[in-house]
Image (cartoon, grey):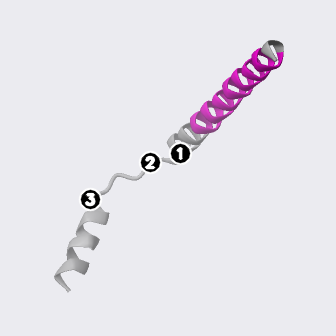
């Protein structure tokens, strides 16, 4: 019971992000993921090209 009360207390003290902040954070995560995917695709292509060139 003490645990439940402390959880409720902690939840009330939590500052939740606004909709605008949540959307901003989500778009940042999506854009970062896309940039990393493009970066790794370019690196993968370059490594494959180098291996094929050497073989």
Q: Main secondary structure of the magenta part?
A: helix
**For residue 14, side relative to residue 50 (left or right):** left
Image marks 1 and 2: residues in contact by CB distance under 8 Å: yes
Q: CA distance from mark 3 to mark 1?
A: 18 Å
**For residue 45, side relative to residue 36 (left or right):** right
Q: CA distance from mark 1 to mark 2?
A: 6 Å
Q: Which residue is mark 3?
A: 13
Q: Residue at x 78, y 23 (%)?
A: 48
Eyeballing the image, is 44 above or below 4? above
Magenta range = 27-52
> What residue occupies the far left of the structure in this picture?
2
Q: Secondary structure at mark 3?
A: helix
Q: Earlier in the sequence, mark 1 or mark 2?
A: 2
Residue 24 appears in which quarter of the rendering?
top right
What is the number of the mark on residue 17? 2
Position in image of residue 31 (x %, y %): 65, 32
Q: Secondary structure at mark 2?
A: loop
Q: Earlier in the sequence, mark 3 or mark 1?
A: 3
- Check residue 28 for magenta coloring: yes
Q: Relative to the observer, which residue lies in front, 29 or 12?
A: 29
Figure label count: 3
Q: Secondary structure at mark 1?
A: helix
Q: Which residue is mark 1?
A: 22
Density class for disc 1 (Cα within 10 Å; few <14, some 14-19, many ≥20) is: few
Q: Quadrant of the N terminus?
A: bottom left
């Amino acid at each position: 019971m003490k645990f439940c009360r402390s959880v409720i207390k902690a939840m009330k003290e939590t500052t939740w992000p606004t909709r605008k902040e949540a959307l901003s954070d989500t778009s940042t995560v999506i854009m970062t993921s896309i940039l990393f995917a493009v970066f790794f695709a370019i690196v993968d292509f370059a490594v494959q090209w180098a291996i094929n060139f050497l073989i």
